Image (cartoon, rainbow, N blue to C red):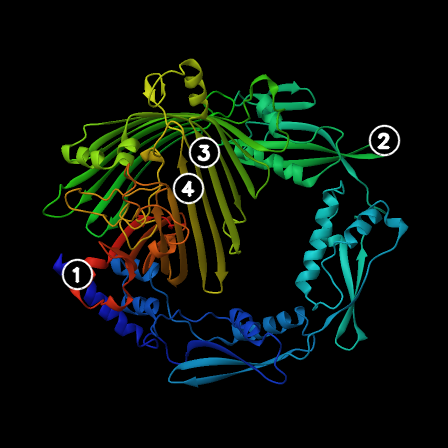
Amino acid sequence: MNRLLLHITLLALIATSTACNPTRRIQEGQLFYLGASVEFTGAPPARQKQLETELLEMARPAPNEKFLGLYPQLGIYNLFANKKKGIGKWLREKLGKPPVVYQPGPVESSHLRMEKYLKDNGYLQAAIRYDTTAKNKKVKVNYSVNAGARYTIGMVDWPQDSALTPIQGLLEREKLKSLLKVGEPYQLSQLETERNRLAQAGVERGFFQLSNENFYYYLDSTLARNQVGLYLRVAPPQGETRFRRHYIGETTVHPTYLLEEERSDIETDTFNLEEFRFIQSQEFIRFPVLRRMILQREGDLYIHSLQQKSINRLLSLGPFKFVNLKYDLREEQDSLFLDRRFFLTPALTQDFSAELEASSLESNSLGSALNINYTHRNFLGGAERLSVNLSTGILTQLGSDVRFINSVDLSLEGSLSFPSLLVPFGLIPAERSWQARSTASLGGEFERRTAQYTLQSFRGQFAYQWQPGRLHQHSLSPLQLTWVNTRNTSAAFEERLAANPRLRSSFGNYFIASIAYQYEYTEQKPQQREDYFFMQGRAEAAGNLSYALSSALDPAQEGPYKFFGTPFAQFFRLEADVRYHDYLSHGSWIARANIGAALPYGNSGAIPYIRQFFVGGANSIRAFRLRELGPGGITDGFTAEQGISDQTGDIKLEFNAEYRFPLFSYLKGAVFVDAGNIWLVKSQSDNGANNRGIFEWDNFYNQLAVGAGAGIRLDITYFVLRLDLAFPLRRPFPGEGFRWVLDEIDLGARQWRQDNLVLNLALGYPF
């Protein structure tokens, strides 16, 4: 191990030394390109700093990336430049980057691109020149920019031509929503956005042939000083004198279409269902399911978004890899019809996956898990999705005075999902524009905490999920059943239960019958760097129906009511997760708030353990171990005798802020701050003597723990390996409460590092 560390250290030192000499591999007559700078001459523009950043992003070529004044990727390339095979060649190609050499062509193209960008953004008189500064085989390019005044929109003229009828009515309506405002800066991109907006509005009203190419502008820069006049004009479709609306015609579906098939006579089985025709080579998915996914019927006015939604609904079924839609234009009795043909390419219906992961490495504890999943996407021939998941995990506490394995978890869950809302008696009509599913699931979990207890739980659930649009998603579980059994409790754990009535109540044998609703809103667009807001809220009410039935059937029974001989839990639980992701030019900020509250009442004296809140760990407050904090001002935390922290509460407040930035290649960095805690809604003891864990509005902020740290992430598209190192800034002390420890930070002291640093190793981002 020591020899391996020595080799890695030597390799890092050699790579660093080569990174200090970037011209090492530069040939005679070549110059190492250092990058570009931008200097404004004349009157400075209003947003000079932002404009400078935008122009520098256009400068080509892009220089070698620097980190702390060095070129690490270039250093790796120089170190292994002559390696033709082996690990050296792999390191050079995967982690290294060759030196960027100055070339006049890309610089001249950058100069022209910058000028065009300025003129497209209203600086119509902009002029740019550039020169180079060379020294010691290195060169830097300087762009001198004279932006001039920025032009604004002086007027917008819309067409008034009855020959455009019926599209003239569309233009009159959209004029009121125009993005082009008099007095705003002229921007070519805004003109393009307006053209796209008008075309989109048209295809949503039946104008199938309409596109942004049909809209164009005349510009008049002589309207007034530093103003332009915009004249919108519309070109009729090719071969036509005016625009006409289109209607849906016949619909043909090919459920077993293969891309490599060129002959149409391979599909020989034809079946008609109402106005739909299905042509296939073999039975695959029942036709009524496909028909329900396709929106609009023959004779309906063509609406582009509903056609795209039909494609998305067919893809969301699961059994299809590709969905293509083609149109055949047909004129009948002076009306234009679009005959639709859906080509559905089947995918593999069954999938098996296994994943082994190290879930966290916190202080002196190590967790690992094995997840095995089987999925069948067309289980009963109607796009039903069968999923079976097996998960196993252990948590190991390293130390001389604790058990080696502290926790063992095993869970098995199976679910069957149907591509529609299964509602009895037709209470809800068949959805027309929703993406909806109904899911029934059964599962069980076994958890063994060494020297403490064994927890068994079995659960069943029926849920509806529907997505009315891209931004919103709903889930309703009208029936959730959970049975929990605690056994094999140790004498030490029984003593804890005897001293804590709330803990005893939460760990007993009980039954949960609940209804839950979850709402999710997200503006995130996959693979796009756009700021977005995310919100998820969940509400659960348990035990109300059980309480009503039990009290009605046997009102005379004493103590907690029972359901089939087992006490049932009664509570109300709310949880919300809110995030905002702000993308910057070379990184991003993420802010998150996670808030939850649960109230036991009626038949329960405490929230069941599996529904309680906790903080700490790799995805929470990373400066503290899992379940180490709280509740409130109670500072028991982890002890060697317990072997594992197990602090839970009824109320949770957690806040996180993280700045993520690229280092080089697939390696990303992050710095973060986390804060929060958990609390109780009432005292742990019967006499109310211990109130330090209760949430109080005038005191809760004094019981917030705060931690900070930094991390690195290996981000390879769909796989993220994360390593975070954190330490407390504000922490609890037995008998003292919470206090700041900023003045105690001493990274150079071994004892401080051992007592405070928490290392988290996990897969994926924390939020």
Q: Earlier in the sequence, mark 3 or mark 4?
A: 3
Residue 450 shows in the view: no
The answer to whether 510 is drawn above or below residue 102 in the figure is above
Amino acid found under the numbered disc labelled 3: Glu
Residue occupied by mark 3: 540
Task: Give the class, few, some or many, for how many residues have Cα within 10 Å of label 1's Cα (few <14, many ≥20).
Answer: few
Q: Which residue does the numbered mark 1 point to in the structure image?
A: 5
Judge left or right: residue 403 versus residue 268.
left
Which-is-in-front pick, marks 4 and 2? 4
Q: Nearer the viewer, residue 703 or 122?
A: 703
Q: Earlier in the sequence, mark 4 or mark 1?
A: 1
Amino acid on which disc 2 is placed: Gln
Where is mark 2, residue-wise? Answer: 333
> Which residue is denoted by mark 4 in the rendering?
597
Observer-nearest residue: 521 or 696? 696
The label nearer to you, 2 versus 1, is 1
Q: CA distance from mark 4 to mark 2?
A: 65 Å
Alpha carbon of mark 3 to alpha carbon of mark 4: how far? 11 Å
Q: Identify the secondary structure beneath mark 2.
A: loop
- Inspect the image, locate mark 4, and give the three-letter code of the amino acid beneath it: Ala
Task: Please identify the quadrant where the N terminus is shown.
Answer: bottom left
Residue 308 occupies quadrant = top right
The one of 533 and 132 positioned closer to us in this rendering: 533
Closer to the eye: label 4 or 1:
4
